[in-house]
Image (spheres, rainbow, N blue to C red):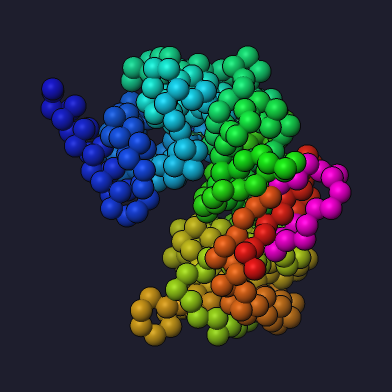
Amino acid sequence: MDIDTTNTLELRNAMVDRLRESGIITDTRVENAMRRVPRHLFIPQAHFQRAYTGESVVTHRDEQGVATSSASEAGIVAVMLQQLDVQPGHRILEIGAGTGYNAALLAQMTGPSGVVTSIDIDAEVTREAREHLTAAGYDTVRVVCGDGDLGDVESAPFDRIIVTAGAWDLPHAWREQLAPGGVLVVPLRMRGLTRSLALQWEDGRWRSRSMHECGFMPIRGLGGVAERNVQLGGDSGVFIRTDEGREADPEALGAALKHPPTLRWTGAITRNAKHVDLWLSHLDGFCRMIATAPALERGLVRPIYPWGSMAVVTSNSFAYLLQRPSGADDLIELGVCAYGPDSNELAAAVAKRVTAWQHAQSSLSDLWVEVYPAGVANIPEGVLNIAKRNTHVVIRSGS
Ligand SMILES: C[S@@+](CC[C@H](N)C(=O)[O-])C[C@H]1O[C@@H](n2cnc3c(N)ncnc32)[C@H](O)[C@@H]1O
């Protein structure tokens, strides 16, 4: 064993140890596969030490600089493999081959009797995934260039399908190509929020078995619905990210940012603002606010998470969620910061909804998702109902 191999093995084990200790890896089959597959061989553009931090690494961008392919963060890879419940001998379809790392983990877990097919829409990414898989000794994986919305008729049916790009809808092919009792794991975008869902088809609809918060680059091609990133005022470093065709006026909202904000603390004190985003997504104009590091440093906005906040826009005003410590024990109080001519009304409306979330919190701990074919009769009313092209998504709660 040369020094590099020893180094990478140690770093890999340390990465897996961290994921295990933080409670992210709970399944020894996933743990063993992650200890075996050399992640650094799938991200040759990154230094091997970076590969074993487990962070996501963007590998391809389009002409505008928008990321189009990446190695996903190791933690979410582990979570989704656990949701998928891979067994030796399974036939598996992955949509979004990317670097090929996840496909190698799938091949490791299904063993010699399993069959893994991985599709990517990008020809160069597909070629690279094939090269990485060969270099790491997983050349039995079939890597196909194509649009994953169509699945892969040639190797169907599948026991498991895993999607590793943010899907806006569920195409028919995934249901048609999944064997009875099979599991589909997909990061589903709902009003701009993404949850990784493990879905099973039963009684004429998909029903989720588990859901986890995550973020993925949007799926492209036939099922693509682009996210829009609108920079307020053109150069503020503050972006409003909208999904599902919602509009935001960069000039009017940029002008709003130049006025003093309205701040409203809600009295909603919590340790964990779980699902507050889904709850707020009921509001008209719901979106997300993303701020660049310089905008954060200038103190222009103070979003609830470093990567952004739930926000609401009108034609000339916007409001976003923020938090402040509340006493001991990691408790936080949620608040609303609003800008623009409608800031008072908007802050009051968002604060009211946050207070309602606090009252509904116990029932929200037990959320699940049902996805019905579009147009079927008697779709139940849930916490949130969202009509898509092919389907109708219902988020339901235990109460
Ligand atoms: C986050 S990366 C996938 C990471 C990958 N699973 C890995 O282990 O490195 C998302 C990938 O999905 C691909 N993609 C986007 N839309 C697609 C589609 N309609 N069909 C197939 N692949 C698609 C992108 O080209 C990109 O490579």
- Image check: 310 left or right of 247? left
Q: Nearer the viewer, residue 119 or 294?
A: 119
Answer with the quarter of the image where residue 146 lies.
Answer: top right
Q: Residue at x 45, y 33 (%)?
A: 86
Q: Nearer the viewer, residue 157 or 50?
A: 157
In which quadrant is the C terminus drawn? bottom right
In which quadrant is the N terminus drawn? top left
Q: Nearer the viewer, residue 5 or 303?
A: 5
Q: Is residue 220 above or below residue 152?
A: below
Q: Is residue 145 above or below residue 12?
A: above
Q: Residue at x 66, y 25 (%)?
A: 177
Residue 376: within the magenta?
A: yes
Q: How many marks?
A: 0
Answer with the quarter of the image where residue 395 lies.
Answer: bottom right
Q: Is residue 10 above or below residue 295?
A: above
Residue 236: within the magenta?
A: no
Q: Residue at x 29, y 42 (%)?
A: 16
Q: Residue at x 32, y 48 (%)?
A: 19
Ligand 1 quarter of the rendering: top right
x then y, percent, for residue 211: 55, 51
Residue 179 in view: yes
Prevailing secondary structure class for the magenta stretch in the rendered image: loop
Q: Nearer the viewer, residue 297 or 285?
A: 285
x then y, percent, for residue 153: 66, 18
Residue 55 in view: no
Answer with the quarter of the image where residue 249 lies.
Answer: bottom right
x then y, percent, for residue 168: 68, 43
Specify the segment rendered in magenta: 371-385
